[in-house]
């Protein structure tokens, strides 16, 4: 569904490549997670996949980007955005501001495309149901909590029915409650068959929702692999991404000989529980 | 949260098509300025604006908002023109070097009556029309959707920006910035306040325009709208009638040789 | 930049040029008619249609200009205009909190003109007054043309390189303020009878008492405050722009094309752009 | 410097009662954290310390001062406040000038100001970026500039509003080490945080808030042991505490070391 071949990119008026020789393949219907330290080029990569680089930002783009069968550089931005949706970091900025209720805000993109009124109403109802925001439809988008705003932002992209959705740190500005709300809807999104690319810092959540993890460091895609093994990889420390306490604790336990040498390290709570079950609860009491 | 004056009610005036109200407002303004007689303005207030205000149920707010704007203007108008009107000849009251002329007061009455109509009728429109509905109605009639976007978005952004400006003011004060001192010092204070405000706001714009493009704002398709704007045959006829009345108002004084 | 199909764009271009030209002609004609063509006795009586001509000419002219200008703006600029308008309003209020005896209510307009050009300035200018009309008081509406002129002049000042040097900006601001005062005077005189506020009304009264006509008095009153206020506005804008990172400023196509802030490395390009302007 | 809240209530002009009769004594040199979901009143409460808010009733003491008697600018000499969003305060063209803004406002001797600025840059790992425009840095680095700007003011009390949001691993570690080092200098650190692991590992006292009230006050071990409190405050326990809980352990280790140390005792 997404194919990046040997992609390098430098912003206008600079010779410094913020991304170099990126090769990335995301099969249709899967969820790809991309992790990287602050400043590693995550936002730029999100913009490349969704066509804003080079169509809006200009600059020097090498290699080919093919999304949903279309070569992004060869089509117009209008066509590119019909293949890929982009949810940006700040829900405040994702909301257009052109509309006074959530219902109309959701329809904003469809109005721009000239979709018929009856169809718009149907799609608004459907997407609101999917994300569980039906009760917010008559509220002002600016009167919502951060988490609710982010759900509206995601809904406003889903409604465009793009086969691919890119999310650039969609929970970075949310409290734990809001974060959980956003990750919960990712499960519903999976069921719709959409292809998802998530850029995220929160490793525990990523473990639960992504199929494959790609690591961005030193301007390159430096490693990739299945979610659990990649997110427990000790090299993530060197790359400034870190690891969950589940991973660190299991690693320390293994090094002290408390766990088997060949143990598969956990990333999330679900991974960790079976691993430590042999340590009896009652004895510790 | 919007910052407009819109008064949430469901009166007959509120339910009118926004374009009908807009054309009525324009016709009223054209009429009072085209026939510059104070009693014409007075009649319009009594026969058109006041009844509409009563029907709308927003009369109280209309009165308090308008008076706040009008009292200083009208007061200054009568005092300044009464005292210093260049064409003033007939002195009706004098005290030392101060004298008030009839011509000056008549001039103030003429101008003042029109300002009163302008302010009352405009505020009534704003009170009874949600800006979002006005924008949809105008976009439906061929206004560029970019205008609609800018106006609606500004109305919703102002409170957010005011909040951010406050927050910056506090953040800098918390770093020891004092607002006291000479005017020059206070101009200097503007920099640490404005620079983060501007940079932050314009950085947001970059993100926001990306998000809008992702939602096909740049599309050249003919826009549709989710919420239909209500309209009736009577209103369609009324709108043409308003236009004819306004044109008649412009022509009358010229035809009668009053000007 | 996103590409558009050529044929409709070309016809739009002609239409937009006609709109801009018509708007400009109407505004200029309105001013000349009110100032030059009007016999003084009529202008001094409330029984004349000068008020109608002032409002109608300026408002229609400003709307035509804005209609012609808005189609030229890419989405990135359209998204910037609300921020600029909010800045006009929020800074206007901040200034009164800090307690400065100025308006500084067009900082956003000047800023947007410097970064995105005169067309963006026109749209920001007219819509600032529309927003004022919707949120505060309708008496701002007849003055929309003044903000439009500030936007146009700031945009051309930017093209001419007036924002490259710290001391040129206040000069451009003073000139803009001068024009703004001249253009707004007929509205203050014929629509509001000189009574737009307590302080300004008293000054107009003083000039009339000295034997000036109403129009002359409102013009003189405007000249007392506008050039100074706009000189300070332009100075504040140039200071803000200087404090912003150059990478941020250079992201705007207008800034790059017209070399608004100057750059040692682009001397050749700089000369071509100034001759064009 | 000791700070204390005495029966402090605060109601916004809108009528929202954000803080309800809160009393707290925070002794000099304590590392003190406040947790709770957005809207719980955490930020409103700590903003009383530098006079941004004045209590509707009750009193706030900073050392021997009562905040009502002093302006924000005066209180800034005693309480340094790092706002959540660095972009709301950074304005200068160079990192070093922004960091020097506070000390200059406080009227420090040039030598002292210079030394404090250099030390703050060093501590936040920004010495190499002293001449860079703050806007050219990443969010994680900009947050550290804002922190350096407050550290350079050398205040006896430092308030951190969500210092770890938007930080990568490197940034979180650096902030943790700064919190520890402030304690060595005897300065009081008060932090609001959503990161429970950061909280459990770096603070000696935790207060959980919900709806303007204090639900629990104690060591991290005390507070994170109370399920009812965590539920009401809508916070999750630190990762390893949740693991211990899922395993049915009665004790809840909060850090990697204490968890691993507890393992042998549980071995079957």
Image: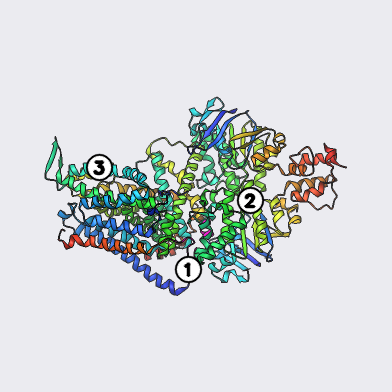
Q: Earlier in the sequence, mark 3 or mark 1?
A: 3
The residue carrying pointer 2 sits among few (fewer than 14), some (14 to 19) or many (20 or more) residues within 10 Å by Cα, namely some
Relative to D8, C151 lies left or right: left
Say if A137 sits above or below B64 in the image: below
Res. D76 in view: no
Residue at the top extreme of this rendering: D64
Tell me whether the residue at label 2 lies in contact with that at label 3, contact meaning CB atoms closer than 8 angstroms: no
Q: Does the magenta run of residues contain C142?
A: no
Q: Do pointers 3 and 1 mark residues of a single chain?
A: yes
| Element type where label 2 sits in the image | helix
Mark identifier at residue B220: 1
Q: Which residue is mark 2?
A: A181
Q: Does the magenta run of residues contain B223?
A: yes
Relative to D59, B89 lies left or right: left
| Residue segment shown in magenta | B206-228
Mark identifier at residue B76: 3
The residue carrying pointer 1 sits among few (fewer than 14), some (14 to 19) or many (20 or more) residues within 10 Å by Cα, namely few
Mark identifier at residue A268: none
Indicate the position of residue A283 as horizontal and vertical percent values.
85, 38
Q: CA distance from mark 3 to mark 1?
A: 51 Å
Tell me whether the residue at label 3 lies in contact with that at label 1, contact meaning CB atoms closer than 8 angstroms: no
| Element type where label 1 sits in the image | loop
Indicate the position of residue C154 as horizontal and vertical percent values.
37, 56
């Amino acid at each position: 569904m997404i194919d990046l071949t040997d992609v390098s990119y430098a912003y206008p008026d600079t010779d410094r490549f913020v991304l170099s020789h990126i090769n990335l393949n995301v099969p249709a219907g899967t969820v790809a997670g991309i992790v990287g330290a602050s400043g590693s080029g995550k936002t730029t990569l999100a913009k490349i996949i969704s066509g804003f680089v080079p169509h809006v930002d200009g600059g020097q783009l090498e290699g080919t980007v093919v999304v949903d069968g279309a070569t992004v550089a060869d089509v117009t931005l209008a066509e590119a955005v019909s293949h890929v949706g982009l949810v940006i970091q700040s829900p405040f900025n994702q909301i257009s501001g052109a509309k006074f209720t959530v219902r109309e805000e959701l329809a904003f993109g469809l109005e721009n495309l000239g979709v018929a009124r009856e169809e718009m109403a149907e799609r608004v109802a459907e997407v609101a149901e999917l994300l569980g925001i039906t009760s917010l439809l008559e509220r002002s988008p600016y009167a919502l909590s951060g988490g609710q705003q982010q759900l509206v932002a995601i809904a406003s992209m889903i409604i465009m029915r793009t086969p691919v959705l890119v999310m650039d740190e969609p929970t970075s500005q949310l409290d734990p409650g809001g974060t959980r709300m956003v990750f919960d809807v990712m499960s519903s999104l999976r069921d719709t068959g959409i292809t998802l690319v998530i850029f995220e810092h929160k490793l525990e959540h990523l473990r639960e929702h992504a199929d494959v993890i790609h690591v961005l460091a030193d301007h390159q895609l430096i490693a990739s692999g299945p979610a659990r093994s990649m997110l427990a990889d000790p090299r993530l420390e060197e790359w400034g991404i870190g690891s969950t306490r589940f991973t660190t604790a299991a690693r320390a336990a293994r090094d002290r000989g408390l766990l088997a040498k060949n143990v598969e390290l956990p990333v999330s709570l679900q991974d960790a529980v079976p691993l430590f079950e042999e340590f009896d609860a009652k004895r510790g009491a | 949260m919007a910052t407009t004056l819109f008064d949430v009610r469901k009166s007959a005036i509120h339910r009118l098509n926004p374009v009908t109200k807009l054309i009525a407002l324009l016709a009223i303004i054209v009429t009072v300025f085209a026939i510059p007689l104070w009693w014409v303005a007075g009649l319009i207030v009594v026969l058109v604006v006041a009844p509409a205000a009563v029907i709308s149920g927003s009369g109280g707010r209309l009165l308090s908002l308008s008076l706040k704007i009008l009292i200083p203007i009208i007061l200054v108008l009568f005092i300044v023109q009464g005292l210093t009107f260049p064409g003033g000849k007939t002195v009706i009251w004098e005290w030392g070097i101060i004298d008030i002329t009839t011509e000056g007061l008549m001039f103030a009455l003429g101008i003042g009556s029109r300002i009163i109509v302008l302010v009352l009728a405009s505020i009534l429109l704003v009170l009874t029309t949600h800006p979002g509905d006005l924008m949809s109605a105008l976009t439906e009639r061929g206004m560029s959707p970019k205008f609609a976007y800018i106006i609606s978005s500004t109305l919703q952004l102002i409170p957010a920006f005011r909040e951010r400006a406050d927050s910056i003011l506090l953040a800098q004060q918390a770093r020891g910035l004092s607002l006291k001192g000479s005017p020059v010092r206070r101009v200097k204070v503007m920099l640490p306040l404005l620079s983060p405000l501007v940079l932050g706001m314009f950085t947001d714009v970059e993100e926001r325009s990306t998000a809008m493009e992702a939602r096909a704002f740049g599309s050249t398709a003919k826009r549709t709208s989710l919420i239909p704007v209500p309209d009736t045959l009577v209103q369609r006829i009324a709108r043409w009638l308003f236009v004819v009345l306004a044109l008649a108002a412009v022509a009358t004084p010229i035809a009668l040789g009053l000007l | 930049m996103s590409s558009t199909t050529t044929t409709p764009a070309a016809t739009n271009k002609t239409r937009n040029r006609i709109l801009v030209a018509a708007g400009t002609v109407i505004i200029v004609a309105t001013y000349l008619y009110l100032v030059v063509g009007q016999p003084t006795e009529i202008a001094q009586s409330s029984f004349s249609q000068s008020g109608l001509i002032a409002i109608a000419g300026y408002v229609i002219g400003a709307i035509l200009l804005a209609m012609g200008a808005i189609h030229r703006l890419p989405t990135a600029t359209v998204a910037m205009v609300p921020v600029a308008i909010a800045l006009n309003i929020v800074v206007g209020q901040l200034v009164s909190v800090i307690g400065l005896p100025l308006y500084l209510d067009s900082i956003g307009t000047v800023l947007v003109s410097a970064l995105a050009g005169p067309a963006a300035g026109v749209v920001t200018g007219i819509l600032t007054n529309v927003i004022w009309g919707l949120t505060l008081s309708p008496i701002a509406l007849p003055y929309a043309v003044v903000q439009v002129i500030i936007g146009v002049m700031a945009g051309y000042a930017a093209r001419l390189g007036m924002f490259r040097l710290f001391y040129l900006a206040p000069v451009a601001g003073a000139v803009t303020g001068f024009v703004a005062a001249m253009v707004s005077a007929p509205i203050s005189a014929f629509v509001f009878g000189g009574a737009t506020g307590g302080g300004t009304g008293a000054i107009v009264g003083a000039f009339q008492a000295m034997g000036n006509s109403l129009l002359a008095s409102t013009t003189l009153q405007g000249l007392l405050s506008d050039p100074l206020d706009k000189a300070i506005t332009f100075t504040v804008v140039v200071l803000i722009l200087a404090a912003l990172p150059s990478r941020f400023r250079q992201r705007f196509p207008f800034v790059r094309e017209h070399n608004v802030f100057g750059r040692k490395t682009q001397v050749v390009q700089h000369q071509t752009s100034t001759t064009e302007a | 410097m000791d700070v204390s809240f005495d029966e402090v209530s605060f109601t916004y002009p809108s009528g929202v009662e954000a803080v309800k009769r809160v009393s707290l004594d925070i002794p000099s040199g304590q590392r003190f954290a406040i947790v709770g979901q957005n809207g719980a009143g955490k930020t409103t409460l700590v903003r009383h310390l530098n006079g941004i808010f004045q209590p509707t009733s009750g009193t706030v003491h900073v050392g021997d001062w009562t905040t009502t008697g002093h302006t924000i600018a005066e209180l800034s000499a005693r309480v340094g406040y790092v706002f959540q969003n660095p972009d709301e305060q950074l304005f200068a063209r160079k990192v070093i000038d922004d960091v020097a803004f506070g000390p200059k406002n406080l009227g420090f001797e040039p030598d002292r100001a210079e030394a404090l600025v250099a030390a703050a840059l060093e501590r936040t790992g920004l010495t190499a970026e002293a001449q860079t425009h703050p806007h050219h840095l990443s969010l994680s680095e900009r947050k550290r500039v804002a922190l350096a700007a407050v550290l350079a003011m050398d205040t006896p009390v430092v308030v951190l509003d969500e210092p770890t949001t938007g930080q990568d691993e490197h940034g979180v570690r650096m902030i943790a080490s700064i919190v520890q080092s402030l304690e060595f200098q005897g300065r009081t650190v008060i932090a609001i945080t959503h990161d429970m692991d950061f909280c459990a590992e770096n603070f000696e006292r935790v207060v959980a808030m919900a709806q303007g009230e204090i639900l629990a006050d104690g060591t991290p071990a005390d507070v994170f042991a109370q399920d009812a409190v965590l539920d009401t405050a809508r916070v999750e326990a630190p990762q390893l505490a949740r693991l211990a809980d899922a395993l049915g352990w009665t004790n809840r280790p909060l850090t990697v070391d204490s968890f691993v140390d507890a393992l042998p005792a549980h071995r079957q």
